[in-house]
Image: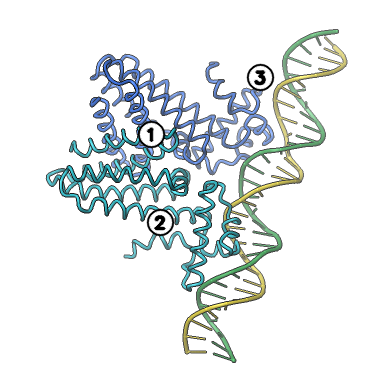
Chain colours: A cyan, B blue, C yellow, D green
Amino acid sequence: MDATEDTTSQALRRAPSQKRSQERVERMLQAASALISEGGSDAMRMGEVAERAGVSIGSLYQYFPDKGAIIRTLAERYNAEGRACIAEGLADVRDMGGLVEAFGGLIDTYYGIFLAEPVMRDIWSGTQADKALRDIDVRDSRANGALLAEAWQRVMPGADVGAIERKAFLIMSLGESAMRLAISVERAEGDALVADYKAMALREIAAV
Amino acid sequence: MDATEDTTSQALRRAPSQKRSQERVERMLQAASALISEGGSDAMRMGEVAERAGVSIGSLYQYFPDKGAIIRTLAERYNAEGRACIAEGLADVRDMGGLVEAFGGLIDTYYGIFLAEPVMRDIWSGTQADKALRDIDVRDSRANGALLAEAWQRVMPGADVGAIERKAFLIMSLGESAMRLAISVERAEGDALVADYKAMALREIAAV
DNA sequence: TTGCAAATGTGAGGATTTCTCATGTTTGTA
DNA sequence: TACAAACATGAGAAATCCTCACATTTGCAA
């Protein structure tokens, strides 16, 4: 079962096998990323992506079936990075105090990334528009939730597994929503909202 | 009946003054609503809206500056309805028990609407894509949050006003997110997620 | 009633953007 | 060196939003 390669094979129309084309695809993604950070994914034009990457529009469509596929590929990259970060942050958690500290720290880290990374911001924001992106988003929350649930169970071995998994999923998904909200209001209020969310999430974790 | 004209006048390029044109604008909105419930706002074509409403494409643009304006107008309508529902539900709250019961009931009501109303579903889903729609969404959460904060203060007079207002805002905004998440997974899981959100929100309310 | 200005209505076509495909070029390898 | 497979190209087809110059209808003052 090549379940892990599923997302990739769906996103790319053709896998670049030669070194030259691998580099070109990389340039396409970087160009797209730059354009998104400048004006958002809506303002990203396929022709401009091709031009910046130094390839023809035809080459772009050789690898990406449509515009959404580029954005989805970028989204999955960022998701993978974030997930690795979460996995690392929760790896050494041994007791409830450790979990609360580690998870609280992860929220701050994520918020920092949201504030700093215009591409991630934009992709998260556009995440609701496209059905496929929405699915990626939900799957990401689920995967991150599984990581949280694992640590959670470790520190509370007696708790109901199903309930913990579901709550972890909800907490992760609402975390993203809280960040989205935070970055769309004034900075000071956004900070306070994230702090409120953090308190709420940690209380929920401790309450099981 | 004139209170709605406020939001309308911002979205409309020209206010229909004659009875005939008022009815035509109404038909345009109904046609748009029907098309959105069939295939989502993305699949809604301006030409099709005009055709269904029995008007020309030119008439459509006579009143709505762009496609987004139609969606925004519909969004504000639904928001106004929802807000009225929340205001009514929280009006008679006298103590914490009453608040918990009333707010819990409102969550269920909202969830029912989300499940039943494809148009509302779609508009909330698309809510992140368009900057203007996103602003409407945030303002709506803020207004709903103000209603919750008012009732909240009524039952806990001693609490910090600023903190309560901010938390109410967060709870309302995360409520919408929880609903969005719930309707994009299997029904049984969605129900459980909404129940979890409800418990989380009510615990937060009681914890101040 | 009549005349006229303001309001309303129209749809062909301009502008933009995504995406295709027939054709040409490069690469790995036998 | 020959050849198939992989890769690259860009003009233009297709889809869609929106405009605008012109036609029609309405309300009302004379």
Q: What element carries label 3?
A: loop
Q: Which amino acid does label 1 sit on?
A: Glu
Instruction: Identify the image quadrant of residue B124.
Output: top left
Q: Mark 1 points at which residue?
A: B176
Q: At which x and y percent is residue B143? A: 42, 24
Q: Residue at x 34, y 30 (%)?
A: B171
Q: What residue type is labelled 2?
A: Arg
**Can marks 3 and 2 be said to lie on one chain?**
no
Which residue is nearer to you in this view: B163 or B40? B163
Of tags 3 and 2, the one toward the viewer is 2
Rounded to the nearest angstrom, the CA distance separating label 3 from label 2 is: 52 Å
Which residue is nearer to you in this view: A152 or B35? A152
Task: Count residues near mark 2 (Cα–Cα under 10 Å), then give few for <14, some for 14-19, many for 20+.
Answer: few
Assess whether mark 3 and mark 1 are in contact (beta carbons under 8 angstroms).
Answer: no
Q: Name the residue under label 2.
A: A77
In the picture shown, does residue B167 fall above or below C22?
above
Q: What element carries label 2?
A: helix
Most distant residue in the left direction: A158
Q: Is mark 1 on a helix, strand or loop?
A: helix
How many numbered circles does the render carry?
Answer: 3
In the picture shown, does residue A151 fall above or below A13?
above
